[in-house]
Image (cartoon, rainbow, N blue to C red):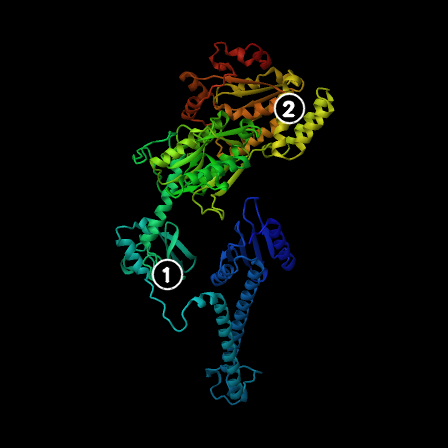
């Protein structure tokens, strides 16, 4: 049964009209993401999430049941799973919701009956403890009586007590029957498969057996196991197997070692997969519960999966080699991924339909060529990507750092890779006789982005293991174990032809996780996507460009039709059209450029005299003066010296905001001051300044001599170490377009450098 998007919308509308939008919520964060229904039962704080796969309803949805945001009701989840499996081929969400409601109602009924029965029992016990002789006025024990002396209470007769006990017994039976009904409803599908009668379940190996196996089996490493045990106060706690002491509890020093009673152990995990669970009767260590799988089978399966990941890492790091005729030759250059190796990567996802169609055609052609002769795996359409950088992120702090760095790269996308810039993908190549890929033509702009990423992650202390020194962009088409000589000859004909596969714009950079489980459609999970858009750079930037277009029209520098076209592009909200508007303003720059409006970008190491130069500018005394933008202004006001990555992102955004206000107000002289050791650090200012019609200059205060570096260190207001200044000098990137001057302290006549200096006049000399 095919299920169109229109039918899916009809099902969603029907569910919401029946149950209300507060109960049934339809979620879909992205067009390519799977649809999910979240059903909320407010009275008992239970939520059920049905995630629909792409080929629903032929394939059952994935189901999760939570209560107070915690996993709960495994019996209900099992019931819904089996119901969904039996309903494949037809729309089933309504039936699953009804099944859930009935099950939860029965559960609520059983709880109410249990509470009612408990209350009656307490009432009977309290009445039984009252002294009946005291009520008749003839208790001879007085205050020494063991029973209660309570005024105004009547004790029921023996017959009545028997009747009440009978009622209590009936209530207890009702509770038992209700609980049994709930239990049976959750397991009715399983019972169909069981043999009728009282067949005894096979005995399950104990936690002690599992511990002994892990300790003494030479094929297993205790470091690969995690123990989940029940803490009396916290609940379920996980610890590495090697963190616990497995000696007799009586001999353990509890001030030094951590030991737990074995009856509290709930489960064991091997590489994150549960292999023994007391609660669910899972035993994949010995296979004692009929799983037909032992720990050695699990080890082999996980090892095979890890080898597949190793090949994927090798794909990113392997050298760009031509076809190797001898497929049986050992691969000496193969890189091996360690357990703590690359687990995240930054990539460009392929979204161009032309490229996807051409890749599919290539895969189909290769499939016909290879037939059944080789084992290989094709890259699915939704998984096609160009990897820019592999990362090893060891904890949540590293992931947060990676997100902040990726956000800081966004201005470079606008500067170097506008949406009008296309990556060219032509021809095929292969790595190590195992991986077939589509070639991405060398691209200087893309290379600058990769270099910036490497620089920022390296400075942040993030491991870049798995990346080659030379960046070779490529698009994986398929991978296999190995290809024979005959198959390589067949592929060689296809690879020699320089196929034109297509062009791809860089519409975003995405941080993917190789560590987290893959999504329903088999792709890696997206952690963060940074969009290539002017609006992301600054939400007010399109409005400022519209104001500038009005200014050009008011000065009769462009016609009304041109003004309206430019404004329409920026007002569209579409990233591609706004990029076209930016390109149009940049083209107009030569004809409308105002030589009186100057953008000056200062670069130089701390202490070289940039601030000294700015403080003595003649332009500061002119009407309108100049606008000064520095990324550290915001935090210098607070007395901060060293900024972390998150603060640096805020500081740079603040500087860009000041800069854009100056651009929109057409300030005559704008200065952007920072270290700017790398040319790409100020590329966005040059790009936007040109679009606003400014004449752009880069003024560099060059410091290279050791004595001058020491002088800069002495002149620093902040607590910078000499080592940091040396790093700036070593990392310095030359800008051939910059105007270079020497530091003020190298001039013998220091007095002249306390007099006003005209930057405009200074620039005219060069």
Residue of label 1? 264
Are the residues flagged by discs 2 and 1 in contact, CB closer than 8 Å? no
Image coordinates of residue 678 in percent, x first then y, are 48, 24
- Which residue position is annotated with label 2? 585
- Is residue 315 something one can see in this rendering? yes
Tell me the quarter of the image containing the N terminus: bottom right
Q: Nearer the viewer, residue 311 or 90?
A: 90
Measuring from the top left, give residue 413's x and y in whole percent: 54, 30
Assign the C terminus to one quadrant of the image: top right
Q: Residue at x 65, y 31 (%)?
A: 542
Residue 374 image-quadrant placement: top left
Q: At numbered mark 1, what does the secondary structure look like: helix, strand or loop? A: helix
Mark 2 surroundings: few (<14), some (14-19) or many (≥20) residues within 10 A? many
Dividing the picture into quadrants, the one containing residue 372 is top left
Rendered image: mark on residue 448: none
Q: Residues within 10 Å of mark 1 (few under 14, many from 20)?
A: some
Q: How many marks?
A: 2
> Can see residue 467?
no
Q: Position of residue 102 (x, y in %)?
A: 56, 66
Q: Residue 379: horizontal and vertical position, in percent?
A: 45, 40
Is residue 394 shown above or below 688? Answer: below
The answer to whether 665 appears left or right of 88 in the picture is right
Label 2 to label 1: alpha-carbon separation: 70 Å
Q: Is residue 166 above or below residue 734?
A: below
Q: Nearer the viewer, residue 602 or 615?
A: 602
Foreground residue, 304 or 717? 304
């Amino acid at each position: 049964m095919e299920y169109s998007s229109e039918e899916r919308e009809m099902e969603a509308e029907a569910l919401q009209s029946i149950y209300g939008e507060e109960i049934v919520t339809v979620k879909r964060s992205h067009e390519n993401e799977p649809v999910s229904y979240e059903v909320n039962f407010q009275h008992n704080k239970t939520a059920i999430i049905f995630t629909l796969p792409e080929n629903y309803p032929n394939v059952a949805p994935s189901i999760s049941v939570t209560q107070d945001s915690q996993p709960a009701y495994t019996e209900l989840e099992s019931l819904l799973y089996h119901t969904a499996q039996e309903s494949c081929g037809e729309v089933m969400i309504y039936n699953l919701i009804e099944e859930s409601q009935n099950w939860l109602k029965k559960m609520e009924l059983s709880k109410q009956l249990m509470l009612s029965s408990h209350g009656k029992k307490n009432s009977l016990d309290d009445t039984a403890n009252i002294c009946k002789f005291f009520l008749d006025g003839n208790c001879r024990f007085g205050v020494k009586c063991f029973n209660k002396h309570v005024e105004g209470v009547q004790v029921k007769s023996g017959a009545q007590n028997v009747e009440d006990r009978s009622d209590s017994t009936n209530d207890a039976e009702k509770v038992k029957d209700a609980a049994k009904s709930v239990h049976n409803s959750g397991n009715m599908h399983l019972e169909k498969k069981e043999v009728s009668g009282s067949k005894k379940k096979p005995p399950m190996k104990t936690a002690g057996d599992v511990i002994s196996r892990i300790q003494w089996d030479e094929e297993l490493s205790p470091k690969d196991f995690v123990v989940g045990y029940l803490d009396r106060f916290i609940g379920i706690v996980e610890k590495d197997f090697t963190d616990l002491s497995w000696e007799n509890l009586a001999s353990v020093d509890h001030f030094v070692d951590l030991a737990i009673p074995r009856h509290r152990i709930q489960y064991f995990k091997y590489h994150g997969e549960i292999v023994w669970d007391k609660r669910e009767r899972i035993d994949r260590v010995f296979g004692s519960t009929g799983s037909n799988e032992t720990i050695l089978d699990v080890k082999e399966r996980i090892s095979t999966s890890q080898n597949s990941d190793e090949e994927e890492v090798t794909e990113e790091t392997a050298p760009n080699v031509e076809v190797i005729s001898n497929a049986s030759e050992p691969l000496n250059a193969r890189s091996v991924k360690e357990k703590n190796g690359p687990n995240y990567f930054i990539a460009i996802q392929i979204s161009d339909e032309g490229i996807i169609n051409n890749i599919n055609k290539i895969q189909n052609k290769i499939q016909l060529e290879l037939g059944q002769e080789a084992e290989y795996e094709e890259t699915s359409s939704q998984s096609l990507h160009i990897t820019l950088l592999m990362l090893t992120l060891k904890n949540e702090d590293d992931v947060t750092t990676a997100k902040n760095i990726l956000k800081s790269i966004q201005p470079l996308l606008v500067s170097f890779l506008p949406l009008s810039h296309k990556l060219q993908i032509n021809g095929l190549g292969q790595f190590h006789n195992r991986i077939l890929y589509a070639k991405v033509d060398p691209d200087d702009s893309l290379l600058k982005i990769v270099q910036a990423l490497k620089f920022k992650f390296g400075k942040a202390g993030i491991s870049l293991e798995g990346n080659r020194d030379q960046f070779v962009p490529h698009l994986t088409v398929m991978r296999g174990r190995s290809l024979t000589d005959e198959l390589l000859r067949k592929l060689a004909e296809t690879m020699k032809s320089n196929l034109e596969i297509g062009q791809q714009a860089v519409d975003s950079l995405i941080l993917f996780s190789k560590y987290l489980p893959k999504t329903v459609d088999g792709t890696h999970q997206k952690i963060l996507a940074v969009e290539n858009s002017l609006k992301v750079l600054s939400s007010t930037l399109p409005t400022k460009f519209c104001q500038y277009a009005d200014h050009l029209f008011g000065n009769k520098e462009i016609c009304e039709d041109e003004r309206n076209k430019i404004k329409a592009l920026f007002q569209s909200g579409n990233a591609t059209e706004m990029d076209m508007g930016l390109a149009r303003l940049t083209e107009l720059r030569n004809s409308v450029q105002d030589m009186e409006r100057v953008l000056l970008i200062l670069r130089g190491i701390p202490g070289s005299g940039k601030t000294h130069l700015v403080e003595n500018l003649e332009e500061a005394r002119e009407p309108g003066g100049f606008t000064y933008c520095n990324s550290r202004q915001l935090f210098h006001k607070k007395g901060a010296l060293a900024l972390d990555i998150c603060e640096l992102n805020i500081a740079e955004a603040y500087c860009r905001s000041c800069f854009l206000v100056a651009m929109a107000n057409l300030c005559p002289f704008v200065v952007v001051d920072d270290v700017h050791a790398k040319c790409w650090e100020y590329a966005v200012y040059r790009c936007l300044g040109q679009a606003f019609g400014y004449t752009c200059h880069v003024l560099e205060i060059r410091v290279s001599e050791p004595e001058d570096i020491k002088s800069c260190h002495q002149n620093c207001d902040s607590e910078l170490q000499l080592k940091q200044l040396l790093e700036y000098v070593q990392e310095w990137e030359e800008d051939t377009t910059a105007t270079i001057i020497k530091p003020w302290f190298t001039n013998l006549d220091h007095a002249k450098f306390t007099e006003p200096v005209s930057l405009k006049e200074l620039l005219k000399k060069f």
